[in-house]
Image: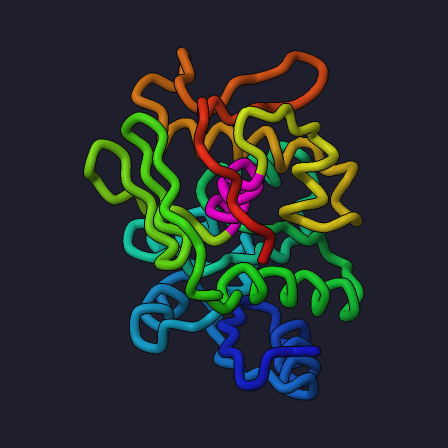
Amino acid sequence: MTPSGARILVVDDEEAIRRSLERNLRGHGFQVETATDASQAIAAHLASRPDIVVLDLGLPDRDGFDVIRRIRRSSSTPILVLSVRGSDRDKVAALDLGADDYLTKPFSVDELLARLRVLLRHVARPSQGTEPVFRVRDLTVDVERRQVTVAGKEIRLTPTEYDLLRAFLRYPDRVLTARMLLQAVWGAEAESEAHYLHVYMGRLRRKIEPDPRHPRYFATEPGVGYRLLADAAPPVPEL
């Protein structure tokens, strides 16, 4: 079920695709705003603060990668890249800059809607009012407020980065396989998207670890997955 009234900013210079997206998204209950180039996209994001940005990379004035960079300077708004560029190199580059998901053209509307629902669940999960504050060394996660700090400094995580961190908090000191993490964050359909996990683990380490080359919090278990080195920290309950 689509959350009522969620606001989507669609950025694409191809009129036929832009109109098709607008028609289909409005038909499923979304509010839709459109932009045809990078400058319009950045201005629209600042003005309307959409719930999700659906972004083409091939824009007439600047590359879509620049839009991702600009948005990520000040916002964790989920970004779904929708592009004809289908190489792993482009996918990883977009994810590494801060995009939350990547869908290659041509695409099915059903798959697009499914991915939008996943991103909206990441940002719209209700607080239960009983969730703990997780602490291990200099890392503190206030689960109810979705606030992450390291050595007293607040760390801005995208919704997907935060959900990956939450997956670790539920099972501190337990080895989590790549498949388990992919299912927990992206769903069962993403089990083969191992590059997603590699990129996002790199991003978490860069934001949280004092020295990402010598992790204090996220240990790699070669050939298996990853483990949060949390000592005796309590597990976080499921939502």
- Name the residue located 39 percent from the left edge and 41 percent from the top edge: 134
Q: Is residue 179 above or below residue 108?
A: above
Q: Is residue 66 above or below residue 217?
A: below
Residue 80 in the image: x percent, y percent?
Answer: 57, 57
Left or right of residue 144: residue 17: right
Is residue 68 visible in the rendered image? The answer is no
**Magenta region includes residue 11:** no
Residue 61 in the image: x percent, y percent?
Answer: 41, 58
**Magenta region includes residue 167:** yes
Which quadrant of the structure image shows residue 48? bottom left
Q: Which colour scheme appears in the figure? A: rainbow
Q: 170 and 182: which one is in front?
A: 170
- Name the residue located 67 percent from the left edge and 34 percent from the top edge: 88
Q: Is residue 192 above or below residue 128?
A: above
Q: Quadrant of the N terminus?
A: bottom right
- Name the residue located 71 percent from the left edge and 14 percent from the top edge: 223
Q: Is residue 235 above or below residue 121?
A: above
Left or right of residue 120: residue 60: left
Left or right of residue 153: residue 173: right
Q: Quadrant of the C terminus?
A: bottom right
Left or right of residue 70: residue 190: right
- Name the residue located 44 percent from the left edge and 32 percent from the top edge: 233
Is residue 101 visible in the rendered image? The answer is yes
Residue 166 in the image: x percent, y percent?
Answer: 51, 44
Q: Which residues are magenta?
A: 160-170
Q: Give the prevailing secondary structure in the magenta stretch.
A: helix
Q: 83 and 196: which one is in front?
A: 196
